[in-house]
Image: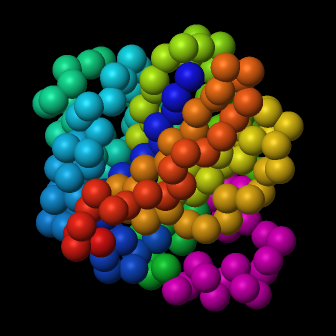
Amino acid sequence: MKIIIVRHGETVGNNLGITQGQNHGKLSKLGLKQVEKLANYLKNEKIDSVYCSDLNRCKESIIPLLRIIKINVNYTPLLRERGKGTFEGKPSNELREWSKNNPDKVPSGGESKEDVDKRAKKFLDDNLKDWKGKTVLIMTHGGTKGSLLNMLLVKNKENSEIIEKGSPNAAVTIVEFDKNEKLFISKLHYDQHLGDLK
C-alpha cells in the first residue's frame, strides 16, 4: 500500500498572510503553476483512488492531475483544514499573537488540534481497510496532512508527533507499507518537483 498525501498549491490568502482555516480560498498565480508541476510529477504513479478536501483550494489543486489520470474523486469535509473560527479571513499574525497569549484555548467557533486529529482518525478508520495493495492520493491542507501522518504512525504503533515541520504548498509526502505491513515514510514534504516555484 502506498499513500500519497499532498498539500494544495499556494493560495491568495497564503501569499497575503491571511488566516484561511475552513474558508474556501483561491489559488494564486504561483499556486496554479505549482499544481501543474505537481500533476506532472505524479503522472506516472499508478493511482487507484483519490480523496480530496471539499474546500475549493484543494479542488482547484487536483484539477491538473485529473486531466492526466481521469479518475473519480471522493470529496470529503473530513480532510478540511483546522477551523480557525473568528480569525478566519484576518491577518495570520493576529491568530499567532492570540495563540501565544492563550496557548490552551481554541478560537471561538474554531477547532482544536485534537478535533482535527479525530477527523483524520475517522477518515482513516473509514477507508484504510479498502486500500490494501493500492496507491491512494489524498489532497488536503498543511495541518490536516500532519494529523493524517500522526494518526497513521499511531495506528502502526510508531512514534507519533514526529511530523512537526510544516508542509510547503504542493509538497508530497509518501507513506508506504512493506510486505510485513510496517509503515515507512519514503518522502516527507518533498517539493523539489516545483523547481523555483516555491
- At horizontal 59% and vertical 79% (from top left) the residue drawn is 95
Q: Can residue 26 be seen in this view?
A: no
Tell me the quarter of the picture where residue 44 sits: top left
Q: In this view, does 31 lie above or below 64?
A: below
User: Residues in magenta?
Assistant: 93-113
Q: In this view, does 118 lie to the left or right of 59?
A: right
- At horizontal 41% and vertical 41% (from top left) the residue drawn is 139
Magenta-colored stretch includes residue 69: no
Task: Please tell me which residue lies in front, 193 or 56.
Answer: 193
Magenta-colored stretch includes residue 104: yes
The C terminus sits in image quarter: bottom left
The N terminus sits in image quarter: top right
Estimate the x, y position of residue 121 in percent, counting from the top left. 71, 34
- At horizontal 24% and vertical 67% (from top left) the residue drawn is 195
Task: Please tell me which residue lies in front, 195 or 137.
Answer: 195
Q: In this view, does 30 lie above or below 149?
A: below
